[in-house]
Image (cartoon, helix red, strand yellow):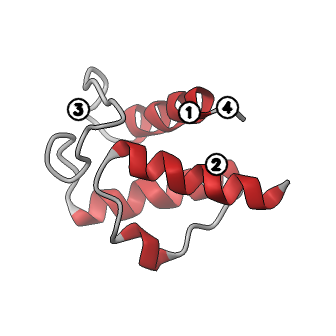
Amino acid sequence: MQREEIAAKVRELIRTHQPGFEDVDIQEDTRINTEAGFDSLTFVYIMCKIEAELGISIPHRRWEKMLTFGDVLDAIEKELAKKK
């Protein structure tokens, strides 16, 4: 799965599971905790949805270091690469 495919899938998950995010423009440099408006509970919920949908498990200690949408994509790519 290419990075842009991953990004599109994650954006779709966010827009599907978070009311009010249907029209939010989420780019790689979007800060997920401020610009995207995710509080900590929303972030955990979205990460769990991503993991379930993609069949991966991102170590929770890495979640704390994710500041931007690009950081989330990096973590997903790393976990998907392990599955190959």
Which residue type does callout 1 highlight?
A: Lys
Mark 2 surroundings: few (<14), some (14-19) or many (≥20) residues within 10 A: few
| Element under disc 4 | loop
Real-space CA distance between mark 2 and mark 1, rounded to the nearest whole angstrom: 9 Å
Contact flag, marks 2 and 1 (Cβ < 8 Å): yes
Seen from this angle, which residue lies furthest right?
84
Front-most of residues 29 and 58: 29
Position of the C terminus, as image quadrant, is bottom right
Which residue type does callout 2 highlight?
A: Glu
Comparing marks 4 and 2, which lies closer to the viewer? Answer: 4
Whether residue 23 sits left or right of residue 69 in the image: it is left
The residue positioned 23% from the left and 46% from the top of the image is 31
Quick one: label 1 or label 3, which is nearer the N terminus? 1
Which residue type does callout 4 highlight?
A: Gln
Real-space CA distance between mark 1 and mark 4, rounded to the nearest whole angstrom: 11 Å
Q: Mark 3 points at which residue?
A: 20
Real-space CA distance between mark 1 and mark 3, rounded to the nearest whole angstrom: 17 Å
Contact flag, marks 4 and 2 (Cβ < 8 Å): no
Name which quarter of the figure residue 4 lies in: top right
Quick one: label 2 or label 3, which is nearer the N terminus? 3
The residue positioned 25% from the left and 26% from the top of the image is 24
The residue positioned 53% from the left and 57% from the top of the image is 75
The percent coordinates of residue 82 (x first, y second) are: 76, 61
Comparing marks 1 and 3, which lies closer to the viewer? Answer: 1
Any mark on residue 53, and which?
A: 2
Whether residue 29 sits left or right of residue 83 in the image: it is left
Q: Mark 4 points at which residue?
A: 2
Real-space CA distance between mark 4 and mark 2, rounded to the nearest whole angstrom: 16 Å
| Element under disc 3 | loop
